[in-house]
Image (tube, rainbow, N blue to C red):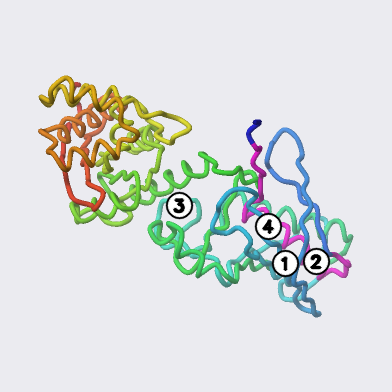
């Protein structure tokens, strides 16, 4: 059976730009319920998409409307929510529509505000990234040009997300220093389902914020449980000095090196087994669990050959883990943790210090291993 092709969606930045265009056209007297927007999806060719407008309101001073965020098949927290734009003339003064006018863009209800350095937006500004800002301004200027209205000196655009503050609780914004709501994001206008690029962009942001805050090393966690356990073990590492890297181990290590930050890798048995086997992307579609690695480690730990060979018949790494917890690991957990540390050290070529900590599935520490900067493996 052919694999279903996942449907693309649109970024919050594209929705904000479309809403801004619609509100501007309505303010200038155009009957509008849909707008066409050029997206920066492929820079070499123009990509146009149509957006339905909702909740249009208008009076003599301000016009506003919204676009419902369609994330396609990507399970994004913003999917299905409304992104709105309210547009008004600056001081109500009219001038020229030739392009020589000002477009002021502000963040309204539900749009977060940046409180820490290291993000694309400056501290104190709304959390609207550079590409969405460009898209919003371009869409407003295009709307003014299309209406051929003379005498406009400038417009003020307020982007809002009425459900933003509540939905932001399900994001990493608080860790990045974005308070009060969501970020308006997007570099292409298009959302690619389960995009690795989106996750990597979040990793970059976390690292940049930590670096700007003076961090010297980062907690790189596979998941929430190991992250929380890592914070308990390393209370000196502030919350913003942690990255939820998921399956992107290699990328996280590469970017940590790029920023000259040491790394503390924390995780659980199954993910550690994959890295020990040389997989730096640990998602099931990118790697498979090679139980041969566990067999080798069991033999090294002194398990009888027959017992080690029996591991090859296991259905999952978790099954082996539970057996080891019940009967005793005989030092295997430490061997596994050091194997992961060596794999990480090989990846970074000794450029940074590496520490690895294996946690149990209830957050208990099982083993720890480390390499200093410049250490050979």
- Return the residue at label 1: 155
User: In the rendered image of this protein, does residue 37 appear above or below residue 160?
Assistant: above
Q: In which quarter of the image is the C terminus?
A: top left
Q: How far apart are marks 2 and 4 (CA)?
A: 24 Å
Specify which label sits upstream in the sequence, 2 or 4. 4
Residue at left 45%, top 60%? 123
Q: Label 4 near label 1: C-beta < 8 Å? A: no
User: In the rendered image of this protein, does residue 75 appear above or below residue 300?
Assistant: below
All told, the count of numbered labels is 4
Q: How far apart are marks 1 and 3 (CA)?
A: 26 Å
- Return the residue at label 2: 152
Callout 3: 10 Å neighbours few (<14), some, many (20+)?
many
- Return the residue at label 4: 15
Q: Is residue 358 magenta?
A: no
The residue tagged with tag 1: helix, strand or loop?
strand
The residue tagged with tag 4: helix, strand or loop?
helix
Q: Distance between the residues labelled 4 and 3?
A: 21 Å
Q: Label 2 near label 1: C-beta < 8 Å? A: yes
- Return the residue at label 3: 119
Q: Where is residue 331 in the image (x, y as percent from the top left)?
A: 11, 33
Specify which label sits upstream in the sequence, 4 or 3. 4
Residue at left 25%, top 28%? 311
* Of marks 2 and 3, the one in the foreground: 3
The residue tagged with tag 3: helix, strand or loop?
loop
Magenta part of the chain: 4-32
Q: Position of residue 196 (x, y in %)?
A: 51, 39
């Amino acid at each position: 059976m052919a694999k279903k092709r996942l449907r693309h969606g649109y970024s919050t930045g594209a929705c904000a730009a479309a809403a801004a265009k619609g509100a501007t056209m309505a303010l200038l007297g155009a009957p509008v319920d849909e707008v066409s927007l050029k997206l920066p999806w492929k820079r070499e060719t123009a990509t146009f998409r149509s957006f339905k407008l909702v909740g249009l309101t208008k009076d003599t001073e301000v016009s506003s409307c919204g676009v419902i965020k369609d994330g396609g098949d990507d399970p994004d927290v913003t999917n299905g929510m409304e992104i709105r734009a309210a547009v008004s003339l600056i001081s109500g003064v009219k001038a020229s529509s030739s392009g020589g006018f000002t477009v002021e863009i502000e963040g309204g209800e539900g749009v977060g505000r940046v409180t820490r350095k290291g993000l694309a937006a400056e501290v104190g500004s709304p959390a609207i990234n550079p590409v969405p800002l460009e898209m919003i301004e371009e869409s407003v200027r295009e709307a003014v040009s299309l209406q051929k209205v003379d005498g406009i000196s400038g417009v003020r655009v307020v982007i809002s997300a009425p459900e933003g503050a509540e939905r932001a609780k399900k994001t990493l914004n608080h860790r990045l220093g974005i308070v009060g709501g969501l970020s308006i994001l997007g570099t292409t206008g298009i959302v690619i389902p389960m995009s690795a690029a989106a996750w990597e962009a979040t990793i970059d942001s976390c690292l940049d914020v930590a670096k700007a805050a003076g961090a010297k090393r980062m907690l790189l966690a596979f998941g929430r449980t190991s992250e929380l356990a890592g914070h308990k073990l390393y209370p000196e590492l502030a919350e913003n000095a942690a990255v939820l890297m998921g399956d992107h181990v290699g990328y996280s290590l590469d970017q940590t090196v790029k920023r000259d930050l040491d790394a503390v890798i924390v995780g659980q048995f199954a993910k550690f087994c994959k890295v020990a086997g040389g997989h730096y992307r640990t998602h099931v579609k990118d790697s498979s669990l090679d139980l041969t690695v566990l067999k080798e480690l069991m033999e090294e730990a002194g398990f009888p050959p027959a017992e080690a060979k029996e591991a090859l018949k296991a259905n999952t790494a978790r099954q082996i883990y539970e057996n080891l917890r019940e009967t005793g690991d005989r030092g295997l957990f430490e061997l596994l943790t050091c194997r992961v540390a060596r794999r990480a050290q090989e990846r970074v070529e000794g450029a940074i210090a590496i520490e690895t900590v294996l946690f149990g599935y209830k957050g208990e520490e099982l083993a720890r291993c480390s390499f200093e900067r410049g250490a050979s493996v």
